[in-house]
Image (cartoon, rainbow, N blue to C red):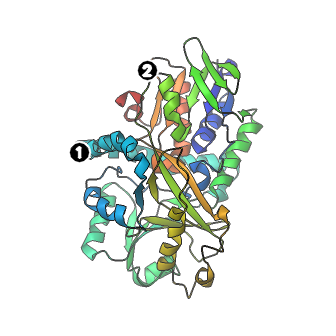
């Protein structure tokens, strides 16, 4: 049956590419629709931190945020901003976010995050081995650093991670220097997550998946989808052209909300605008280094050091505010010992090309879980979006889960927590 089944995958980011590749590999005739092209610069798949963050077991809706929010919002170097003209529009999402802070909801959602995280690296290893690009998955661990926290506070965090079966150790002094040469003396300790990894090039990783998809006979339409009709077959309308498919999978990230609404689903999907700054320097870092105090991350990549991690609620239409990128340089200079990273001393914002700054859209749901599901009213319509900060991390496993749903096979994990009807 699959050889005669056509599937439209809407979205050419890391989620859409994994979905399309898995379906094409299993005999479906797959067409990816993305008006910006595959893994385009406007997608989070292009500009993410490159961190396979399987240690992030906890839902973002944390009651501890409530006391921190005023400081975050007032701090010009803070990690969190809400654009004034977007506050009213984002308010309903934040109300649901507050509801997700309840103890029962956090436990339930945490278990669902854990289920995806525990399969993620294995799925990525299988994929990069199939594609012959093992060098794009580097399992060298990651660090979460502390500058001002007390020993008790750090060990509390250590205990919380270990309670979720995360393999992590506390390091300081010479042990920390060996793991991350060049960190400033103000970094007094860190949690070392030993079983996570990163990619030195998120875009090259996506390109390898895209190349494999095309070699298998997959098709790409560089056009924006304006409408989906799912009554009698699936009709995709894009740029004055309509095409009929047997199935459709919506993987359009932050743009998925309007497409889901056309099919009768009003999902509370919000856009977290993420920024990065790419520094054309080499350091001795071999793994991602995140800062607990500064709420940002540094990842060594093939073409330099990527600084990322800020959050801005501003929707899809507001212009980027690249001051959100620029402030990351201040954090990096504070985190790295400049006598050991000589290039960092001389870098100024004026010297950096505009291409060093990036903004992209993270698709976030208030419970920190994605939607990975078949439509309850039409089994030929499927959803794979809302992966918040973990789109790269969950990319491979999400593609496998959709493949199994389409093939009506048992899924590797229980997908009921990710159903669209939960809203």
| Vertical order, 417 against 235 (above or below) | below
| Vertical order, 73 against 126 (above or below) | below
User: Which residue is pictured at 50% across the width and 64% down the height?
Assistant: 141
76 sits to left or right of 126: left
Q: Position of residue 333 (x, y in %)?
A: 51, 78
Quadrant (top left, top right, bottom left, bottom right) of the C terminus: top left
**Label 1 Cα crowd, 10 Å radius (few <14 / some 14-19 / many 20+):** few
| Vertical order, 123 against 234 (above or below) | below
Q: CA distance from mark 1 to mark 2?
A: 27 Å
Residue assigned mark 1:
102
Residue assigned mark 2:
376
Q: Position of residue 170 (x, y in %)?
A: 37, 72
User: Which residue is pictured at 30% across the width and 42% down the height?
Assistant: 95
Query: Can the viewer see residue 335 in this picture?
Result: yes
Please report whichever mark, 1 or 2, sits nearer to the chain's N-terminal start. 1
User: Which residue is pictured at 60% across the width and 38% down the height?
Assistant: 16
Residue 211 position by quadrant = top right
Most extreme residue toward the left is 103
Most extreme residue toward the bottom is 339
Q: Nearer the viewer, residue 293 or 134?
A: 293
């Amino acid at each position: 049956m699959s050889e005669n089944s056509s599937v439209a995958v809407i979205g050419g980011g890391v989620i859409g590419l994994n979905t399309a590749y898995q379906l094409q590999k299993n005999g479906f005739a797959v067409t990816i629709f993305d008006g910006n092209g595959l893994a385009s610069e406007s997608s989070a798949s292009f500009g993410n931190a490159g961190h396979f963050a399987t240690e992030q077991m906890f839902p973002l809706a944390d009651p501890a945020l409530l006391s921190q929010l005023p400081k975050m919002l007032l701090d010009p170097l803070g990690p969190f901003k809400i654009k004034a003209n977007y506050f009213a529009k984002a308010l309903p999402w934040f109300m649901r976010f507050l509801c997700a802070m309840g103890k029962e909801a956090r436990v339930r959602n945490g278990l669902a995050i854990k289920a995806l995280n525990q399969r993620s690296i294995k799925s990525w290893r299988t994929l990069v081995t199939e594609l012959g690009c093992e060098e794009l998955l580097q399992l060298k661990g990651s660090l979460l650093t502390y500058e001002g926290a007390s020993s008790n506070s750090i060990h509390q965090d250590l205990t919380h991670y270990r309670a979720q079966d995360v393999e992590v150790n506390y390091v300081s002094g010479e042990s920390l220097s060996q793991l991350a040469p060049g960190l400033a003396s103000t970094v007094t300790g860190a949690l070392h997550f030993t079983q996570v990894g990163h990619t030195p090039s998120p875009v090259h990783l996506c390109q390898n998946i895209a190349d494999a998809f095309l070699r298998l006979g997959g098709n790409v339409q560089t056009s924006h989808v304006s409408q989906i009709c799912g009554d009698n077959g699936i009709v995709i309308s894009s740029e004055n052209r309509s095409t009929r498919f047997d199935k459709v999978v919506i993987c359009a990230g932050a743009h998925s909300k309007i497409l889901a609404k056309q099919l009768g689903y009003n999902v509370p999907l919000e856009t977290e605008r993420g920024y990065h700054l790419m520094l054309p320097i080499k350091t001795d870092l071999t793994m991602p280094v995140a800062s607990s105090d500064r709420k940002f991350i540094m990842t060594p990549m093939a073409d330099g050091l990527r600084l990322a991690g800020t959050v801005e609620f501003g929707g899809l239409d507001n212009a980027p505010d690249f001051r959100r990128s620029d402030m990351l340089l201040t954090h990096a200079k504070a985190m790295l010992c400049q006598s050991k990273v000589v290039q960092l001393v001389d870098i100024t914002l004026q010297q950096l090309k505009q291409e060093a700054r990036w903004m992209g859209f993270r698709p976030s749901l208030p419970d920190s879980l994605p939607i990975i599901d078949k439509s309850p009213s039409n089994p030929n319509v499927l959803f794979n979006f809302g992966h918040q900060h973990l789109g790269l991390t969950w990319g491979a496993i999400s593609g496998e889960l959709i493949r199994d749903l389409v093939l009506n096979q048992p899924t590797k994990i229980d997908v009921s927590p990710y159903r669209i009807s939960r809203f």
